[in-house]
Amino acid sequence: MTSQFSLIATKDVIWVILLLLSLSTIGVLGENDGCPMWLAPSYTTTLSADFPKYGLFAGQAYKQDSILPFSELAIPLIDFFADFNRGKPHGSDVLEFLENYLWTQEKIGSMWEGVISAPGIIPGIGVLANYHSTYSNADFLQASILLRETKDDEFKKKPGEANLIRGAVTPYSNATLKATQHIPAGMEIFADFGEVWDGNLTENIYQDKIHRYDYNIADEIVNKMVDLYEKHPGLSLDMKEDIMDFMLQKVLTTVAGPNAKTINSLIPDNPRKLKKVQEAGGTFMYRYRDMIRTSEWLEENGFCLDTIRHGVSTIPNAGRGAFAARDIKEGEIITITPMVHIADKDLLTMYRIEFVENEENDTEEAEYDESEGPLGKQILLNYAFGHPESSMIFVPTGPQVTLINNGAKDANARVKWAESNDPMENPSSYLDLSVDDMAQVKESVLMMKVVAARDIGVGEEITINYGNSWQKAWDSYEEKWKITKEGKPHPLKAEDLRIMYKNKPLETPETIEDNPYPDDILTLCFLFTDERPDGKQMTNQEFGTEINQFVGPTKYEAYDSKSLYLVSVLDRMEAPGFFYNYTVRASLGDDEEEFADVVDVPHSACTFFDSHYSSDIHLEDAFRHPIGMPESLIPVSWRNLR
Ligand SMILES: *[C@@H]1O[C@H](CO)[C@@H](O)[C@H](O)[C@H]1NC(C)=O
Ligand SMILES: *[C@@H]1O[C@H](CO)[C@@H](O)[C@H](O)[C@H]1NC(C)=O
Ligand SMILES: *[C@@H]1O[C@H](CO)[C@@H](O)[C@H](O)[C@H]1NC(C)=O
Ligand SMILES: *[C@@H]1O[C@H](CO)[C@@H](O)[C@H](O)[C@H]1NC(C)=O
């Protein structure tokens, strides 16, 4: 009796365990475990490495085309990659290191900032979305940053008026990643790095040597065979195997030639497994099923990015701010941030660049005239941490960390280096290296924590103390600004015109005299063109050039820098549903003779940019100072300016 009873009980227990197990599996694969995104060691790194490379992991499933958290600032480095910088102490090392962290000026829309180039660093999504040689699941939604809207309340600044914050912050905001395919929960975010990178297969053993095309062909074969089997449900397993052999041996060799062997290896031998490959999301995902991290793994090795949300700062003249997205307890880690070190802040000094013709080989070289003195400092300095006794500065690359403002003595958070007994290990040995040795370290090996100094309630602004040196610099900037600029007019900038012309047609040669644009404003349109659909050839009588037709799309999301052209508006007409349509003359290159006329360009496809050296970043006397690193965080070995 008793034993039978206990047997039933045991069965019940097993049943309950099984139920719990299946529930926990649902949890792992669930759509939402409350964490939007994790920061954790990348799949492309080894956990036992000296210092793992960090990446972003989806905390929930993201549908194809959905926007990923978190939109970020882009900070351009203007004319930074110039020979004169390479020649400075640590110049070539720092440039080589930083190059890995930058996005092209086209992605950001900063191509008119400098005369050489202006690639930018996008902390968070731009730095931490890693590269995988055969796989990507996210790409920048360029329209978000190219057509960003600056909300006046964000800066409390008015168009045409001087303001303290002008030139002190980067105007490039709303850099946004979009899922280019379904991203399951637990998957690392791999950004599309473009064709150039794809050409070079990396030496990293965690990177696949098989090309993306091979997976695509393998996927096609799998899909075809699954279709075939489904159309003929009567096929025996033997017959299925025969068909499969025939496809893989004969057909594939004919189609894929020398790659047939590789592709063959991506397809399971067993016909019954083909469906599983499809369900996994294709041959790549089937091969790398372990790429999807479980929530247990993420909790053990990662950090959930659920603490900060973006808002308008409560601090006067501070612009954007970081707000607590949930209650945070005293001593709790608010966020962690990998830091990119720059060995010498002097590399951020900017000069006016002149192009000097080299007669020997008929080339132009960018040079700067040191006697003219520096133009100013790169805007990146304002986002970096530094110390007056060290030439090193540190750029935080953790998501949303650049939003954290100065709370001075009332700050509710503080920064510290991650300790070595932490899962986010920070080998303290780097704190013993000299600045010269740190310059040779071309990986982001430093990790900082932002820790709550007291309880922080949901919705409260998160601040740290930027330190005395920063405060002094800001106070003297403010004092000078009050004397020289307060209450003075300020030229209208592209961002002002974008708002002014939202519901106002662009100017034409007939109207421009009465309504001139401010100086240094460029008009641009996103142009997708074709010959006229009615087949009628049209040419411009005066210039003999072809006239093209705008063929859309008129959707904001489709606009990227590849389709962006400098234009002059020739004519405009009211167009129901499109507000106004324009006939524009688009310049096709540096050569002023090369242009094309385009008709039916809708108002929504046109926008404004500031021309070279004219955005607020370039304001004379603009505020530039690094955020103060607390005294105790700068080891003696780094104090090379003492
Ligand atoms: C930022 O980008 C998103 C996605 O494209 C867009 O919906 C949003 O309006 C943009 N925000 C601003 C302030 O431009
Ligand atoms: C790819 O490799 C070639 C040859 O080694 C090199 O010249 C090129 O700069 C590399 N491209 C990238 C993006 O690393
Ligand atoms: C042209 O010549 C100068 C020195 O005479 C050299 O530094 C430069 O690299 C040359 N440029 C090209 C494109 O060969
Ligand atoms: C305005 O332009 C749009 C987009 O090219 C086109 O579809 C529409 O027909 C044009 N409307 C007029 C009145 O020209």
Image (cartoon, rainbow, N blue to C red):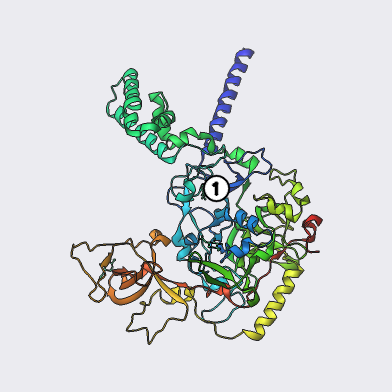
- Quarter of the figure with the N terminus: top right
Left or right for 503, reference 404: left
Q: Residue furthest bottom?
A: 514
Which residue does the numbered mark 1 point to in the structure image? 130
At 18% from the left edge and 62% from the top edge, which residue is drawn? Answer: 535
- Does the image show residue 560? no
Vertical order, 236 against 374 (above or below): above
Comparing 230 with 256, the one in front is 256
Residue 583 in which image quadrant? bottom left
At 44% from the left edge and 45% from the top edge, which residue is drawn? Answer: 182
What percent of the width, then of the height, locates residue 493?
49, 76
Q: How many marks?
A: 1
What percent of the width, then of the height, locates residue 303?
63, 47
For ligand 2, tell me if the residue under mark 1 lies within 8 Å: no
Comparing 513 with 332, the one in front is 513
Left or right for 141, reference 57: left
What percent of the width, then of the height, locates residue 94?
64, 57
Badge 1 amino acid: Asn
Comparing 274 with 639, the one in front is 639
- Quarter of the figure with the C terminus: bottom right
What percent of the width, then of the height, locates residue 268?
42, 27
- Does the image show residue 66? yes
Ligand 3 quadrant in view: bottom right
Vertical order, 182 against 67 (above or below): above
Q: Residues within 10 Å of mark 1 (few under 14, many from 20)?
A: many
Identify the secondary structure beneath mark 1: loop
